[in-house]
Image (cartoon, rainbow, N blue to C red):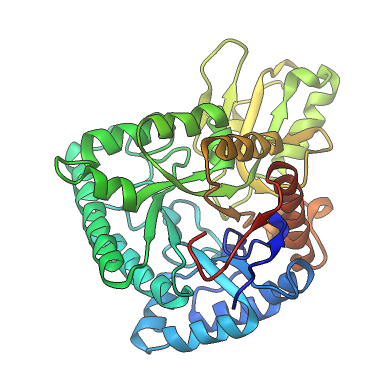
Amino acid sequence: MKCDTAVSALSQPAAIGYCTNVHAGPDLLATRANLERFALAVKEQISAQTPMGIGLWLSAEAADDLREQDLIEPFAQWLREVGLVPFTLNGFPYGDFHQEVVKYDVYQPAWNDPLRRDYTQVLIEILDGLLPPGMEGSISTLPLQWGGRFAASQERDEAAHHLRQIAQTLEELEQRQDRLIYVCLEPEPGCLLQSRADVVRFFEEHLQVPGEQDRIRRYIRVCHDVCHSAVMFESQHETLAHYAQAGILVGKIQVSSAVVLRLDEIPRTERATAFEQLRQFAGDRYLHQTNVRLPGQTPVFYEDLPLALNSVKNPEDAEGEWRIHFHVPIYLERFGALQTSQADNLECLQAAHQLGKLPHLEVETYAWDLLPAELKRAVLSEGIVDELRWLHQQLDLLVPQITIDVTQNP
């Protein structure tokens, strides 16, 4: 399957995709059904004549079924036949990501638990079997554990030990199969790794032991989720530059937007209405970590949006800027009294392009069914298509016409 003529970023099948964790269903049967129902409908509109990239989510149950039932090659064959290229896997959610209440469960097992290492090992084997020959792949993963701002050094060392084992596995795979796969830690607000400084400190103080620095830097990278970074009020340019200066590679960017409330741009008499609109995002399934920054002050962090909302005694007197971890469609800039962090996505793409080759790009808006009614789409695939088209348009402005070959390393 080769595409070696000049094409725009719109047709890059191995570098751009959407994350299939938007679809409910933790087992292999549901995974296949979701790809048939939704991913192929997206492909028909985005890339009907050429392969289309996807970010594949496989729960631990689905991954075990693929391997234990010897279904990796048949699944790979089906993906080739329908033209879906799983260039990246989302290895963050271990279990059912769409159960009634997920909240803190999504952070289990942590990286100091061998179960997380073993799950990732299985994903490596599967991704190697699913990718076309010569193509490199990425796997995003948990930023060690939830919380743990004062975690014992032993926990960090155990997590680092498991990641070094993963790096050794990946090095052996590349030597044996000429296949480059890297595992990417995904910083998230409220986790042990929630900022760029946390990531660099972990690499330098726990992960990179003498004699293994080169191996770690090649096979353990960062998954930069733009929404997460925006919630932390981090500059996209500064964050990517900080990683580059530390010798840490960004293997994957999750293109995603947070909800933003800028109270100083709203008349005091309308702030109560703005908070009522924001309250629609305080759902029960996922944590919606919230940072509130008052003028001239350090942001105040709340583990979940309801906690932040309960801190507001008089909406008219509320000030500052709120940023909420709720992935909203990336084509939105504002809606009602609320805005999004869409500008951070543009800044991130520009910064990544300036630093060199764009890493894997994955649109990750997983909470479509939890959006307020006015933001939902009657047909899910159409919303995903609009997100991908928006991303493709931005890349076409950023990256000139290029030549690609989907059988080779991107």
Q: Looking at the image, is 315 positioned above or below residue 2?
A: above
Q: Nearer the viewer, residue 230 or 1?
A: 1
Residue 357 location, x and y as percent?
Answer: 53, 46
Q: Looking at the image, is 33 positioned above or below residue 125?
A: below
Q: Looking at the image, is 316 positioned above or below residue 259?
A: above
Q: Residue at x 63, y 36 (%)?
A: 350
Extreme top residue here?
Answer: 296
Q: Nearer the viewer, residue 125 or 190?
A: 125
Q: Residue at x 26, y 60 (%)?
A: 171
Residue 264 quadrant: top right
Q: Residue at x 22, y 41 (%)?
A: 208
Q: Is residue 113 visible?
A: no
Q: Is residue 131 visible?
A: yes
Residue 139 location, x and y as percent?
Answer: 43, 59
Residue 156 quadrant: top left
Q: Nearer the viewer, residue 228 or 294?
A: 228
Residue 261 location, x and y as percent?
Answer: 71, 30
Q: Residue at x 44, y 59 (%)?
A: 138
In the picture, the quarter occupied by the N terminus is bottom right
Residue 130 location, x and y as percent?
Answer: 46, 76
* Horizontal side of residue 397 vs 300, given as left or right: right
Number of marks: 0
Q: Nearer the viewer, residue 127 or 90?
A: 127
